[in-house]
Amino acid sequence: MKRTLTLLALVVCAMTALGAEKPKRVLVETPHLSLVLDLFTDGQPRYTYFGPRLDRRDVDNIPTPSARTPLYPAYGQEVVHEAALAMTHADGSMATELRYTDTRIVGEPHAMVTIVRMQDKVYPTVVNICYRAYNDVDIIETWTEIENWERRPVTLTRFASAMLPIRCGDVWLTRLHGAWGNECRVVEQPLTRGFVTVKNKNGIRNSQTEHAEVMFSLDGKSRENQGDVIGAALCYTGNYKLQVETYNTDYHYFMAGIDEENSEYHLHRGERFVTPVLAFTYSQEGRGGVSRAFHKWGRRYRLCHGDQLRDVLLNSWEGVYMNVEEKKMDQMMTDFKALGGELFVMDDGWFGGKYQRTDESGLGDWVADSRKLPGGIESLLADANRHDIRFGIWIEPEMCNERSELYERHPDWIVNAKGRPLVGGRGGNQLVLDLANPKVQDFVFGVVDGLLTRYPQIAYIKWDANMSIVSHGSQYLAASDQSHLYIAYHEGLRKVLGRIRAKYPDVVMQSCASGGGRVGWGILPYFDEWWVSDDTDALQRIYMQWGTSYFFPAIGMASHVSASPNHQTHRLIPLKYRFDVAMSGRLGMELQPGDMTDSERALARKAIADYKTIRPVVQLGNLYRLVSPYDNQHVASLMYVSDSRDKAVFYWWKLATFIDDHLPRIRMAGLDPQRMYRIHELNRIDDRPLFCEGQSYSGAYLMNHGIDLPADHSLPKADRTSWASRILYLVAE
């Protein structure tokens, strides 16, 4: 009999005693999920059930769990346990005791929002716990609204978005961890007694090391397409803390929200503090089911233009770095258009006035450098129009250099501790602008507004952020509100991005922050895509893109073909392999096309043409990860399947070469077992076709038996390498 695990224990002995109040039961539902809350008059609401969608006949009869499943525990009662909310009231009291008062349900075009209202028993403090359940995706969003109606300000010292109790058992935590050039690596660990904390204190780049997304496997170490898994993602742009507390109860207690460290918040009478959204789901199809739920939700409701196919682009950075010149840009556009390219992006190095742009100067002075671009942006746009290619541009509007005209005019705009020397980065000279300041917000908006107003042909903006907040201090905020800096900065950032999107809804924007420093569902509603990593090495990208795919869809995953040897790892990798990796995301290039050989250009032309054919399946299809690079089987494999299951794209990459190594047979997933699929290999370099080329197989055979692929390519001896990769295109007959 199939084992069904739920988030919360349905334990008969935990039912309320005979004669006790019968709670009001609230049901929050998506197409395949149910969340049940029990609400007690003048008592603490509790979680009762979260898991696969319930039969309505079962909803009224499932037992109420113990009191240790509170909806939102506040500090002051049971103080030995972690609290979701803590505050100091105007009279100095640190105790808060929330009790249920009422419930509201609000309909939205694609969702229902349930609002559970609570109030402190002594103080006029109101807390609303909100749940948004979509009617077409299996994601529930929750957030908290804290209102102060005391006469004087209260001080919030902890303000989690939510608390979720998870039934103890063989529970494993999956998280994403990394560093610059090695972002989004997968880490798994069993949950034992004690604390596990995932947090980010960077101030700006909140995904370079830790990630605000986690999975909980409820029945042992997670598996790809089977098993019970909860997935959760905090949708925030700034510092955060995710924490799991386990002690001598039947539950792990998971809390997520803004990191409260050095961020106590003064809430005045009549003000409302709204926490970031925590999005969560439950899958009985393993971590793959969690991923597909988040991808579908992200494309429909979070990612900007999530239903529109992305262009194939060339970014100039690794081709010329800061040596931007008008003729070089024109030549790169010419060469890329000949390969089938659709969009050219001019990266860092194009601007500067009094101070010419280097790593140490010019940042913040957003005027075209006439020494490098004598014809200005106008000339480049004319070139792009002549080549019938779209044009994009790099900016870093939240930062400046000390050696800049901007800093000379506005030294008071810089984030830095009062009375202390400036602390810079990236050469010791880069500074962060204080987005808590409305004047700075206007300036940052003006950078984009000025470019797009003057040059409406600009189709794409690469928005970078290469600096952390390293010296805590705001010259704008009052002395009593310095602890608001981290929160106020990101409130300001979101205001700016909201203004940009309101005025320029069609411009494509990439989120970049020293590579993958800003990959999260808090920032992505304003962006179309993200830069996974500054490391473009194809082999290492397999691992990083694999982790990224746990929560983020391929449509926004910028994956570029770069030069060989790679500029970061110096690894030599054949062009086919580099294309085969990059074509599993949003395809782009990051090199000087003029340096390619004729044979390389021919391969690139064919690969780009093939990618345009499979682009709808890759960017809008359902992801099935087949063999993980972390499983040490020396291969990695995944596939995308269209919603109608009439097309699929299969990827296979060999990761290592050993004598007498036996590579695994790959079983596909997500196909229609009744349909026949004809197979065609893309980017083929072999002198003879694969055994499956042009053949048809049933979906059942491909999923149950699978496919064996050769460990190398059929090539003349002089052309052989240790590298091997395959892309197969499957079309239903």
Image (cartoon, grey):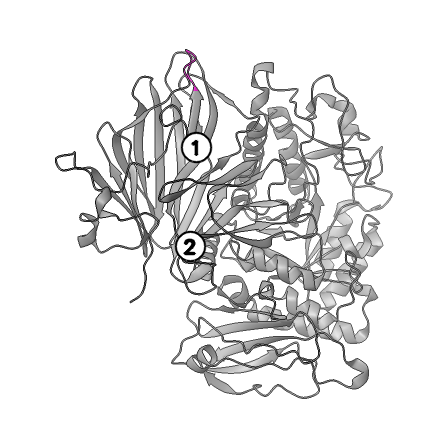
Q: The disc labelled 1 sits on which kind of residue? A: Glu
612 vs 659, left or right, is left
Please identify the quadrant where the C terminus is shown.
bottom left
115 or 570, which lies in front?
570
Query: How far, Cα to Cα, is label 1 from label 2?
Result: 22 Å
241 vs 375, left or right, is left
* Residue at position x 64%, y 87% in the image: 689
Query: Closer to the observer: label 1 or label 2?
Result: 2
719 vs 64, left or right, is right
Q: The disc labelled 2 sits on which kind of residue? A: Asp
Task: Let me know if residue 63 appears in the view.
Answer: no
* Residue at position x 53%, y 76% in the image: 666
88 or 614, which lies in front?
88
Q: Position of residue 569 (x, y in %)?
A: 77, 58
Q: Would you say residue 367 sits in the magenta stretch?
A: no
Say few, some or many: other residues with alpha carbon within 10 Å of mark 1 (under 14 / 14 to 19 / 20 or more). some
Q: Position of residue 494 (x, y in %)?
A: 55, 35
Residue bounds of the magenta highlight: 88-93
* Residue at position x 54%, y 72% in the image: 649
Q: Position of residue 675 (x, y in %)?
A: 41, 81
Q: Which residue is mark 2?
A: 170
Label 1 sits on a secondary structure element that is loop
Residue 398 lies in quadrant:
top right
Marked residue nearer the N-terminal end (1 or 2): 1
Could you tell me if the residues under marks 1 and 2 are in contact, i.e. CB atoms within 8 Å?
Answer: no
Q: Check the image and report above or below for 324 versus 487.
A: below
709 or 425, which lies in front?
709
Q: Which residue is mark 1?
A: 82
